[in-house]
Amino acid sequence: MSRTLLEWARRRRQEGPPDGESLVAQLAGRPSPAQARRHSGFPLPAIEGVQSFYDLLHGTPADAAPRRCAGTACRFAEGFAAHERGPDVHCVGRCYQAPARLERGVFPIPRTALVAQPVVFRHLFGKRPPLAELYATPDGDRILDLVEAAALRGRGGAAFPTAAKWRSARAAPGDRKVVIANGDEGDPGSFVDRLLLEEDPHAVLAGMQACARAVGATDAIVYVRGEYPHAADVVRAAIAEAGRAGVLAPGLTFAVHEGAGSYVCGEETALIAAIEGLRAEPRPKPPYPTEHGLFGRPTVVQNVETLANVPELLRTGARSTTKAFSVSGAVAAPGAVEAELGIPLRRLIDDGAGGMRAGSEFGMALVGGPMGRVLFPHQLDQALSYTDLPGLGHGGVVVLDRRVSPCALAEHLFAFARHESCGTCTPCRVGTGLLDGIRTRAAMERLLSTLETGSLCGFGQGVPRPVRDLLAHAGDAVLAADGRDAGGGA
Ligand code: SF4
C-alpha cells in the first residue's frame, strides 16, 4: 500500500502497463471520478490530478461542443464573432483554414514540394511502393549505418542526430525496449505531422519498424495528439492493414495512444508520463529515455516527420537535406511545403505559399511556434535551417500582416506560455504568469534570464526566444499594455 501519491506513481512505473485502456482514454469518456477509480484502480487524487491536467478532459459533456482554436493563425485571422466564448483549444492543425474549430472530420491539407525529388512527401506525390517493400528493412547494423550516413536529425525541434539516439537505446540493457512516434504536434502553426499520419501512415509505421529493428524494440506506440482524432483512426486502420498484409515484424507490437490536450506532451519525458497514465510532467534528464523510458524500459521517442523520412533514406542511401514546413497566415496559398533546409523565408512564402494574400503586406512571421523566432521584413532572406536559425522548431511558419502589432503578438505568446506551463518547476510556473505584467526592459531581461536558466524543460527555456526577437526589433513598445489588443487582420 503506497502512503503517498509519489510512492504510488513510482510503483506504478515499475509495475508496467496495466491491462485495458489507459486512464486518459477512460477519462475521455467523462466518467465520474468514482467510476474512473473503479475502472482504473487509481487513487482518487491521481484521477483528479490527471483530469485537471489535460485540457480535453476538463468540464462537462456540454463543453464537448466544438472548441474554438486559439492557435496563432486562428488568433489573428478574421472570422470568429466577438461574442463567441467557450473553452479554447491551442491549435487543431488546420491553420490553413483559419479560423478553425476542434471537430472530428477529414480536412485535407494542401501540399507542395519545392524539391525535384521529395523525400518526406514522396508518397504524397508519387506511387507508394507495395507494403512488403516499404516495411522490409536491412539488418540493425546496416540501418544504423545508413541513418548515420544520411545525417538525419530529429525534425521535432531539437535536431538531435537520429542514429546517435538509436545507438544509445540499442546499447542500453533490457529485454523490452520501446519505440514511440511523437505525434504530439503542439506548436501552433504546424500541421505536417497530421498530414503524414493521415495520408502516409505506412511511411511512419515502416520508419518505426526500422527503428525497432535497429534498437531491438518489442513495442511500438504511435502517440497522436487528442486534437487529431482522424489521424488516430487512420493510423489504427493502417496498423490493421499492415498486420493483414503480414508485413509487421514478428515480436513487434504496434499500438496507438491518443493524447488529451497538453502542449508539454511534446517533451519526451512528459509524453512518456502521459502514456503511463500520469500527469504529463517532464522530469530531469539524465537518465535519458533511451536508457530509462516508458515504464523504465529503454525508449526511443522520435518525431513523426523524422520517422517518415527513414524508409526512403534506407532505400536510396541518400543524405537527408529537406524539411517539411507548414505555412499559414496572411499568404495566398497556405499549406505544407517540402523544401531544402536553408531555404530563405522569402522564397518559402513566394514559391511555396503563393506569396502574400491580396491586400496583405508582410509584417512579421512566427517561425517554429511559441518557443520559436519572430522574423521581421528586413529578415525575409533569413535561411531556414537548424544551424542558421536556432528555434526553427517543427518548421511552422505563421505569416502576419503588418496590421498585427508586435504588442498583440507578445500578448498572444504570453497567454500561450501561461496556459501551457505544466507547473512542475517554479521558474516557469511563476515566470510565465508574470510576463504580461512586466513594463520595463530591465525587469523583462531578468525574468527571461530566469526562465532560460532555471526552467526544467525546453518549454520554459524556450519561452524567452520569440520575446527577445520582439524586443530586439520592435523595441520597448512591446512592453506597453495599451498596444496589447491591436491585433486583427492576419
Ligand atoms: S519548464 Fe514549464 S513546462 Fe517545463 S517542467 Fe517546468 S513548468 Fe513544466
Image (spheres, helix red, strand yellow):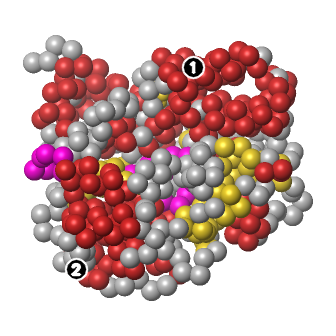
Q: What element carries label 1?
A: helix
Give coordinates of residue 106: x percent, y percent.
51, 65
* In contact (CB < 8 Å): disc 1 and disc 2: no
Q: Which region shows up in magenta?
A: 172-194
In the image, taking residue 177 as reference, residue 430 lies left or right, namely: right
Q: Indicate the amino acid at tag 2.
A: Ala
Please say whether residue 187 is one of the residues in the magenta stretch: yes
The residue at 63%/19% (across/down) is 447
Q: Does the residue labelled 1 lie within 8 Å of ligand 1?
A: no
Answer few, some or many: residues within 10 Å of disc 1's Cα (few below 14, many 20 plus, some between 14 and 19). some
Q: Is residue 413 above or below residue 378?
A: above
In-front residue for pair 210/271: 210
Per the image, the residue denoted by label 1 is: 450
Residue 432 relative to residue 478: left or right = left
Is most of the magenta stretch helix, strand or loop? loop
Amino acid carrying label 1: it is Thr
Viewer-proximal residue among 454 and 297: 454
Residue 229 is at least partly visible in this image: no
What residue is shown with label 2?
Answer: 245
Question: Of the residues under marks 1 and 2, which one precedes in the sequence?
Answer: 2
- Across and down, in percent, residue 116 comes to 59, 81
Q: Which of 334 and 460 is in front in this view?
A: 460
Instruction: Judge left or right: residue 292 versus residue 271.
Output: left
